[in-house]
Amino acid sequence: MADRFAPGDRVRTRATDPDGHTRLPRYARGAVGTVVERAGAHPLADERARGGTPDPHAVHHVRFAAADLFGAGDHAVVVELWEDYLEEAP
Amino acid sequence: MSRINDVGGMTGFAAIVQEPDEPPFHADWEAHVLALNGALIRRGIYNLDEFRDAQERLPVPEYLAASYYERWFAAIRVLLVEKGVATSADLELPHG
C-alpha cells in the first residue's frame, strides 16, 4: 500500500481520544506538524492491544514546534506516529 | 478517556531522580518479573501491546503508587487471569 504522506507534508494528528491503548500521546493530539521521514511499518499497537494480529502500517516521524504542543518553547519535538493517526493538514 | 500513563507535558510531578551507576534492578524480584514477562510474551500468552494496555488499565491510585516493576507485576497478574492461565484464587495461593 502506498504511503499517504511523504517527507515535507503537513499533517494534523487525530484529535479524538480512543477508549483503549494508543501510541499517540495526549500532548500531540489535534496538532499540526511536518512529516520528516518514513520510520518503517509496524502492526498498529492500538489493534494489537486488543489481541489482534494486524498487518503492518506505515509509521512516520513527524516534527512539531514545541510551542504548538505545549504553548511555549522554541525547540522542535519529533514524534513517531502511525499513519492511522494522521490526516492532511490544510 | 485519557489514561494515567499519558502524562507527557503535564506539570506538577517531582523532578526525575537520576542515579549515578544505576543498577538494572533494585531487588531480585524485579529481575524475576522481567524474565516472567518475557517468557509469557514469547509463549504467545499475550503481546507487548496487551501488556502495556494492562498497565494502563490499572486503577489510577494503584498505578500512581506503584514502582516501575510493581506495575509490570500487576499487569502480568491481570493478564494471567484474563487469558485463562490462572484464576484470581490461584494467584492468592501461597507458595508451597
Image (spheres, rainbow, N blue to C red):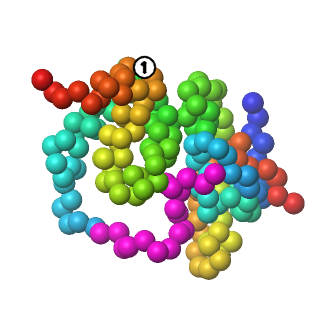
A50 sits left or right of B78 in the view = right
- Give the percent coordinates (x, y) of residue A45: 57, 38
Residue drawn at x 45%, y 45% is B58
The answer to whether residue B74 is seen in the rendering is: yes
Question: On what subunit does the disc labeled 1 rest?
Answer: B
- Give the percent coordinates (x, y) of residue A52: 59, 25
Residue drawn at x 78%, y 42% is A4
Q: Is residue A43 above or below residue B17?
A: above
Quadrant hosting residue A19: top right
Pointer 1: residues within 10 angstroms few (<14), some, or many (20+)? few
The answer to whether residue A37 is seen in the rendering is: no
Looking at the rendered structure, the kind of residue marked 1 is: Gly
Range drawn in magenta: B1-17
> Residue B9: within the magenta?
yes
Residue drawn at x 68%, y 71% is A68
Residue drawn at x 55%, y 34% is A49
